[in-house]
Image (cartoon, grey):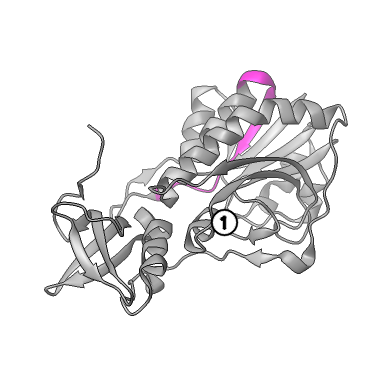
């Protein structure tokens, strides 16, 4: 079985490494490298580093359509994407002999879009999961072929959920690809009436609003986590907020919401080191 992989961030790496170990991966497609912080030095994407580790051809087009002619010359069964970050035109989705598939970080049809993991936290969901779906022209609208669920823990943030869902995907992807290759699956058509969109979270919306209920504020802090990062101002100093609870935590930052107080136990004052009062040593 021959596979082309398309993905960019750390989320993709455990999934792709499992595929590399079990199938013939003939290419990896990544977003282009980007400068680190405000410097000019380009930092390779995590999937480019993975490609180099296994000596696999890596494409990094600004738009994937730029490499259509090269991809069209390749013989492969699956195109598998996971957090690739680009729109993929139908002419490329039609290239694999078997299917173009996407690992999606939510239980569809909830949270179609760029930030499904964050929106599950923003909504206060108690469970989430991954779907393996057919890729179609409409974003995240393909039939669901495989699925796996996990509970969302009380202290989960988007950072921890990204890691958990990446590992969950990696644990299942080999089995799932084999089953789909052997036509051992049942398609589930998404209920269009139940679709919830999950657009990218923006820095412009990252400041918390203490006139909201405590649950809403905490959900926002957990969803925004380190990227793009929720924040507030205390004594005119900007403070990044990474996690919070309504349970009293010694030495935590205490903020008053509309209904009750919350305790910020994972935070970072501007130009200071990050503090996590509940971090396990």
Whether residue 33 appears in magenta in the rendering, the answer is yes
On the rendered image, what quadrant is the N terminus found in? Answer: top right
Can residue 57 be seen here? no
- Judge left or right: residue 121 versus residue 56: left
Q: Residues within 10 Å of mark 1 (few under 14, many from 20)?
A: many
In the depicted structure, whether residue 197 falls above or below residue 127 = below
Residue 164, x across and y down, in percent: 49, 38
Say which of 211 and 116 sits in front: 211
Q: Residue furthest top?
A: 21
| Residue at image location 33% in from the left, 49% down from the top | 36
126 to 216, vertically: above or below: above
Tell me the SS state at disc 1: helix
Report x, y in % for residue 79.
73, 39
Q: Position of residue 189 (x, y in %)?
A: 83, 54
**Residue marked by disc 1:** 116
Relative depth, front residue between 156 and 215: 215
> Which residue is depicted at the point 65% across and 60% down?
112
- Give how far across and how far down residue 10 sits, in percent: 47, 40
Question: Would residue 276 appear left or right of 171 to someone viewing this image?
Answer: left
In the picture, the quarter occupied by the C terminus is top left
Residue pushed farthest right?
Answer: 183
* Magenta run includes residue 141: no
Q: In the current view of this chain or complex, which residue is farthest to the bottom?
A: 211
Which residue is rendered at x = 65% and y = 32% of the image? 27
Q: Is residue 193 left or right of residue 244?
A: right
Mark yes or no: residue 29 visible: yes
Residue nearest the viewer, comparing 191 with 43: 191
Q: Which residues are magenta?
A: 21-34
Against 82, residue 239 (above or below) is below
């Amino acid at each position: 079985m021959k596979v082309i992989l398309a993905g960019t961030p750390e989320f993709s790496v455990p999934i792709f490494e499992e595929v590399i170990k079990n199938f013939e991966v003939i290419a990896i497609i990544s977003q282009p490298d980007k400068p680190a912080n405000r410097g000019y030095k380009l930092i390779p994407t995590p999937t480019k580093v993975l490609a180099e580790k296994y000596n696999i051809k890596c494409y990094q087009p600004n738009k994937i359509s730029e490499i259509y002619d090269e991809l069209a010359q390749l013989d492969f069964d699956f195109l598998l994407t996971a957090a690739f970050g680009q729109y993929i035109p139908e002419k490329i989705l039609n290239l694999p002999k078997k299917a173009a598939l996407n690992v999606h970080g939510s239980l569809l049809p909830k949270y179609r879009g760029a930030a499904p993991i964050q929106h599950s936290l923003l909504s206060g969901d108690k469970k989430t999961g991954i779907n393996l779906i057919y890729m179609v022209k409409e974003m995240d609208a393909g039939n669901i072929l495989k699925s796996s669920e996990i509970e969302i823990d009380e202290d989960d943030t988007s950072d921890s959920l990204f890691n958990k869902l990446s590992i969950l995907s990696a644990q299942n992807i080999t089995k799932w690809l084999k089953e789909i290759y052997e036509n051992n699956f049942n398609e589930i058509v998404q209920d269009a009436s139940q679709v919830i969109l999950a657009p990218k979270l923006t820095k412009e919306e990252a400041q918390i609003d203490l006139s909201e209920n405590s649950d809403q504020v905490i959900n926002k802090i957990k969803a925004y986590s380190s990227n793009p990062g929720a924040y507030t101002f205390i004594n005119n100093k900007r403070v990044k907020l990474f996690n919070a609870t309504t349970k009293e935590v010694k030495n935590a930052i205490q903020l008053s919401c509309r209904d009750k107080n919350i305790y910020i136990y994972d935070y970072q004052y501007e130009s200071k080191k990050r503090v996590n009062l509940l971090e396990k040593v």
